Amino acid sequence: MGRKSRKKKEKRQEKLVVFICTANICRSPMAEKLFEEALAKSETKQNIRVFSAGLTAANGDKASENSCEAVKELGLDLSDHRSSSVTRGTLQNASAIFCMTESHRALMHMYFDLPENAPVFLMREFVEDAEDKELPDPFGQDLATYKVCRDKMVESLPSILKWVEENF
């Protein structure tokens, strides 16, 4: 197989996992970084690209200070994050979309006319026995609230990784 053919084949096999929140400055950037690290530490053989976006994001905003601090405690860096607004193209190319709340899921279906069977899930959807499947917006709240949000995201990572392994 020629070099170009191999590159084309590798490109086709890449899967895109997208994390969605409202403004792409608090929850989804944390989720993106946390999932990237979980993937790096996992034994997955999948070729996965991770991205985050916001339903009402202004393009180019930095991650919130408290989001940066919350993931910094885990050795992760959000200083280079810049917000992106979700696009139809991103959603169409996604192999899986994880949002933070049911309202995010409903708005994506409404705004982008996604098919009923689109791979849109709550980030905590696969966490067994979780009382709270949604991740409320910590924007404007104290660092402790961001840490609670981060920890609930971390709790969801094994179930997302398992879903990815079984479905990609």
Image (cartoon, helix red, strand yellow):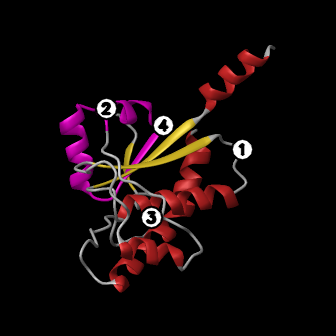
Q: Nearer the viewer, mark 2 or mark 1?
A: 2
> What residue sits right under mark 1 in the picture?
45
> What residue sits right under mark 3 in the picture?
30
SS for dot 4? loop
SS for dot 2? helix
Crowding around mark 3 (Cα neighbors within 10 Å: few <14, some 14 to 19, many 20+) is many
Rendering coords of residue 75 (x, y %): 60, 74
Q: Quadrant of residue 3?
A: top right
> Closer to the N terminus: mark 2 or mark 3?
3
The residue type indicated by label 1 comes to: Lys
Query: Residue 95 versus residue 56: which sits nearer the camera?
Result: 56
Identify the residue at horizontal 29%, vertical 34% (top origin). 116
Which circle marks residue 88 in the picture? 2
The residue type indicated by label 2 comes to: Arg
Rendering coords of residue 146 (x, y %): 37, 77
Separation of marks 2 and 1 at Cα, in angstroms: 28 Å
Q: Which residues are magenta?
A: 87-116
Contact between labelled residues 3 and 2, with CB atoms less than 8 Å apart: no
Q: Is residue 101 magenta?
A: yes
Rendering coords of residue 9 (x, y %): 68, 22
Vertical side of 1 occupied by 144: above or below: below
Separation of marks 3 and 4 at Cα, in angstroms: 20 Å
The residue type indicated by label 4 comes to: Ser
Identify the residue at horizontal 51%, vertical 69% (top origin). 154
| Relative horizontal placement of residue 27, taking residue 96 as reference (left or right) | left
Q: Nearer the viewer, mark 1 or mark 3?
A: 3
Separation of marks 2 and 4 at Cα, in angstroms: 13 Å
Separation of marks 1 and 3 at Cα, in angstroms: 23 Å
